[in-house]
Amino acid sequence: MKALTWQGRRDVRVEDVPFPTIERGNDAIVRVTSTGICGSDLHLYEVLGPFLDPGDVLGHEAMGIVEAVGDDVDDFKPGDRVVIPFNISCGHCFMCERDLFAQCETTQNREHGKGASLFGYTKLYGQVPGGQAEFVRVPHANFGLIKVPHGPPDERFVYLSDVLPTAWQAVEFAAVPERGSVAVIGLGPIGQMATRIARHRGHRVIGVDLVPERLELARRYGAEVVDLQANGHAPDAIRELTSGRGTDSVIEAVGMEAHGAPLAQAAQWAAGMLPDAVARPVFEHAGIDRLRALYDSFDAVRRGGNVSIVGVYGGQLDPFPMMDVFDKGLSLRMGQAHVKRWVDEILPLVIDDADPLGTRDLATHRLPLSEAPRAYELFQRKQEGAIKILLEP
Ligand SMILES: NC(=O)c1ccc[n+]([C@@H]2O[C@H](COP(=O)([O-])OP(=O)(O)OC[C@H]3O[C@@H](n4cnc5c(N)ncnc54)[C@H](O)[C@@H]3O)[C@@H](O)[C@H]2O)c1
Ligand SMILES: [Zn+2]
Ligand SMILES: [Zn+2]
């Protein structure tokens, strides 16, 4: 079968790999019909190479049709339409019983001191072959899989694998007070959906990014926006909009690649990720700092406020502004999304034909799997208006 494989930094290729097979009784094989490329895949593409082997199959946002199930899978049968959560959790261990599915102890990667296994996500997270492929093996399928109805297009459901539960958790962790305000730093797919969910709950949203079409999309869904290119310092702009105080909560949806090199090498490569005309003013006005988005989050939130960090961080030696965080009395929550914890709350919204979260208005590109290498490049460089890209195997 065909699958998208990692080969090296900024080098992914579609190759022939062996068909997956049922290895354990609780496995299912799913024929993938749609699969997203995520901001988290960009970390693999750019900086996490040391934790990957050439040939690793990427992808953790897949849905499709069940092809085969193992003997222990009672709740699913071939032909069912399913979405596959990005984290692999058993549903019955100490952590799963507490709804902490991203920390499942059955699939935990203890040798690396990490949490639950993830599809298509490095040796640190189990090196499980991912879903940017024609077929994928799903361990712990009986608990993990999410059944969705036949009929509506894939886009209505595919974001249940990651984008929607992640954005939902980000808003939950932000604990925005009633009629309160939240700044969403970073308006990629996660920031877009966090914006829509927060608006859906009646919160005031101020979105920050530097890519015009991402700002525009958030504005269409009711956010006020701050353009990082026009306002060098986002926290000042946010304070201006909030009586000098800052927002009640902040969602950080950027992660370790904000403008800078996560592993302290050449900060310049970050400029290469952006079209020149966008990159230059960023360097001139916004500064270069791999923790820029995190610092801006701590700065922009009001005293006593909540910061919800959904962007992925990987460094060990990053300076942490402890004095400010302590003095402002901030509450912080963060981590991988516990996908299944939120699915029951989100499902009614995506099954609703009125599509209140605009699931059909996020993907800018639907490309065949064979074009995945080009899709990665478009998404990383934010070219051709790319905001979310779905691949169709
Ligand atoms: N916690 C989880 O479970 C989870 C799940 C999925 C994704 N993520 C992470 O969420 C983050 C966002 O993912 P995405 O798919 O939306 O990716 P993305 O890369 O498309 O989004 C990041 C956005 O941040 C913007 N940006 C960069 N620097 C900025 C700055 N200093 N200030 C404001 N905006 C800035 C970019 O222009 C881009 O629009 C990534 O770090 C990803 O790894 C976490
Ligand atoms: Zn993802
Ligand atoms: Zn578990």
Image (cartoon, helix red, strand yellow):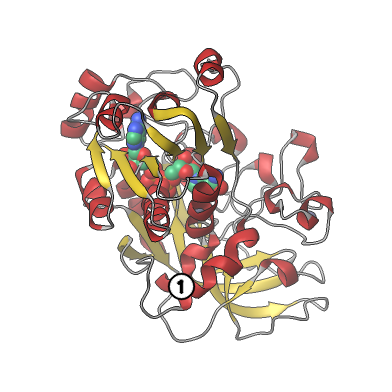
Give the quadrant of the N terminus.
Answer: bottom right
343 in relation to 267, above or below: below
Label 1 Cα crowd, 10 Å radius (few <14 / some 14-19 / many 20+): many
The answer to whether mark 1 is within 8 Å of ligand 2 is no
**How far from the left and from the top, in percent, is residue 171?**
49, 49
**How far from the left and from the top, in percent, is residue 318?**
54, 18
**How far from the left and from the top, in percent, is residue 300?**
38, 28
Could you tell me which residue is drawn at 15 percent across and 32 percent down? 277
Residue 175 can be seen in this image: yes
Could you tell me which residue is drawn at 62 percent across and 54 percent down? 119
The one nearer the camera, 361 or 363, is 361
Specify whether 151 is left or right of 277.
right
51 in relation to 337, above or below: above
Could you tell me which residue is drawn at 74 percent across and 34 percent down? 112
The one nearer the camera, 322 or 229, is 322
Could you tell me which residue is drawn at 23 percent across and 29 percent down? 279
Query: What kind of residue is marked 1?
Result: Val
157 in relation to 274, above or below: below
Q: Mark 1 — residue?
A: 350
The one nearer the camera, 64 or 149, is 149
Give the quadrant of the C terminus.
Answer: bottom left
The one nearer the camera, 354 or 149, is 354
Specify whether 258 is left or right of 308.
left
Residue 2 can be seen in this image: no
Specify whether 25 is left or right of 130.
right
**How far from the left and from the top, in percent, is residue 174?**
51, 43
The image quarter in which residue 49 lies = top right
Q: Quadrant of ligand 1?
A: top left
161 in relation to 83, above or below: above
Name the secondary structure under disc 1.
Answer: helix
